[in-house]
Image: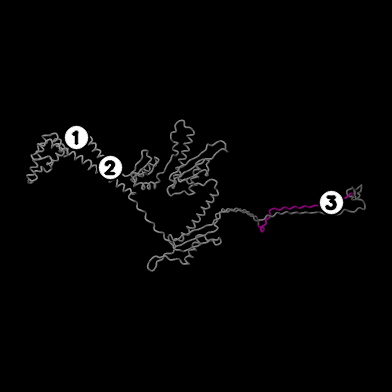
Amino acid sequence: MALVKTEEIVSQSRGFNSLPFLRQLGLMIGLAASVAIGVAAVLWSQTPNYSLLYSNLSEQDVSEIVQALQQVDIPYKLSKDATTVMVPDKHVHDARLKLASQGLPKGMGIGFEILQQDQGFGVSQFMENARYHRALEGELARTIASLQKVRSARVHLAIPKQTAFVRSRKKPSASVTVDLYAGRTLGEEQVAAIAHMVAASVPDMDVEQVTIIDQRGRLLTAPEGSSDLRLTATQFEHRRRVEEYLIKRIEDILTPIMGEGAVRAQVSADIDYTVVEQTRESYNPDLPAIRSEQTIEEQSTGSSLAAAGIPGSVSNQPGAAGEQDAAGGQPAEGASAAPAQPSTSTRRVTRNYELDKTISHTRSGGGTIRRLSVAVVVDDKTVINEDGEAVKKPLSQEELDRLTSLVKEAVGFDALRGDRVNVVNTAFTQPPEPEPLPEPSLLESGMLWDIGRQAAGVLLVLFLVFGVLKPVMRELASKGKALPAAAGSAALPEGMTEDQLTLSGPQGMAQLPPGQQQQSDYEANLTAARTLAAQDPKRVAQVVNNWVSNE
């Protein structure tokens, strides 16, 4: 058996060595290429397809994303510029969910760190201002992107150059573009907060100078010159919140009684937003009070009046009242005595009274509920019949009255205000069951492509083994057998041709008994080995060397 193996190896070696050098080189290159293609096919069949996870990332985002992927054992690939991350197809959605739970990627832009870079020598004032504006825009974009609903943001600032003339000064303005997550929207309060934040970060900027739009191009801030419209929108939002608050109160009080989903309520609120200012001045005549009092008293006597006499020419002449004696100054004889002089007294009193006065200023801010209209629909109640089955049964009038009373108490019913409450009982229509989602087809499934790729790799390897390597080895073996037959055919036993030497010995001895056949095979093999050793001792030595090396 070993001898036959030796002959095959020697024949193959002879066949290969008998080929020209270029053919030998081409054969070795073909074998090496076949092995390399087979290995590459196996590796290709086992390598998954990579899809894009995120692109245009900053270095900090790439570092954090790679660290997060390593923690969850998800393979990844990076582009040459390290701004794109790719993962296998089957891990794309899972990786995005895990990264989104950690707030990645953050989309960090350029901020004030740009000012720390070396600006070089001789940088102009214009470039310094441009870098400062760029850094300020980046910092504002980072702050806006930190909101939960905002994926990324960009800020553009228009800051005019200030002059010494006050009338020629222009105020700066800003425009903000926000990229929101799918299904997310910004409320009016959040939009106003972003506008105030941007306006407060830039000197001399007003809130009205900030414009905010989303990724779909919708204007989120109110246009200029629409103060009345903003006021109306605010009033509408206030009315909506009041109605939702009342609806929630109704559902909260009726749901424990009727069951989940068995109550539907709607409220229409008529709200007065009129602002009234009133100033009132009133007096109370029942409570008088003395504010001031002034008293004047005068007294006078008649002497001055008597000396004067009766007005006339006689009374104004000397001695008219009577002739006086020239010596003693006594009145003349026959003159009568002067009468007694009268006295006069005068008293005047002035009193100022102050009444009780009240001045009141009243301002009504609006938002007063003028009337409420409430509509409530309740489902039939569920009861257990005699057979133990759950059936629907309408509510009685007493139960409806009780529910109506609860609704009135919940909304603050006021009959003087004209409020109305209507509670109706009816059977709700059950919604149809949703259809199951269609199963993805095999073409849409990534598993089919993986299986096909692996099958293609296996078929390619089998083709290389059985279609390339095996025919080449068979050809070499056939050429190796033909050479010894042509060179030493005379040395073979008589009656034996080149195609009669097999693993079991010459075919002519197949009819012998087992013992004699084994001995004849041994002798024939020994004779053939001696003949080969005599004809080509170098090849026999090479075969023996191969045996020793293999063992």
Few, some or many C-alpha atoms within 10 Å of disc 1 (few <14, some 14-19, many ≥20)? some
The quadrant of the picture occupied by the N terminus is: top left
Q: State which quadrant residue 70 falls in.
A: top left
Observer-nearest of 505 and 135: 505
Query: Start and end of the magenta stretch?
Result: 284-313
Hey, what amino acid is under mark 1?
Leu
Observer-nearest of 219 and 435: 435
Q: Assign the magenta stretch its main secondary structure.
A: strand
In the rendered image, residue 58, in percent from the top left (x then y), is placed at: 40, 40
Hey, what amino acid is under mark 2?
Ala
Contact, mark 3 vs mark 1 (Cβ under 8 Å): no
Hey, what amino acid is under mark 3?
Leu
- Specify whether 194 is left or right of 531: right
Q: Earlier in the sequence, mark 1 or mark 2?
A: 1
In the rendered image, residue 485, in percent from the top left (x then y), is placed at: 13, 37
Instruction: In the displayed orientation, state which residue is furthest to the right.
Output: 333
In the rendered image, residue 295, in percent from the top left (x then y), is placed at: 73, 53
The numbered disc on residue 19 is 1
Q: Which secondary structure lies at badge 1? A: loop
464, above or below 291, in the image: above
Q: Earlier in the sequence, mark 3 or mark 2?
A: 2
In the rendered image, residue 319, in percent from the top left (x then y), is placed at: 90, 48
For marks 3 and 2, give the CA distance. 153 Å
For marks 3 and 1, give the CA distance. 180 Å
Q: Which residue is denoted by mark 2 in the rendering?
A: 41
3 vs 2, front mark = 2
Q: State which quadrant residue 255 falls in.
A: bottom left
The numbered disc on residue 45 is none
Task: Let me know if residue 13 is in the magenta part.
Answer: no
Task: Let me know if residue 290 is in the magenta part.
Answer: yes
3 vs 1, front mark = 1
Q: Which residue is denoted by mark 3 in the rendering?
A: 305
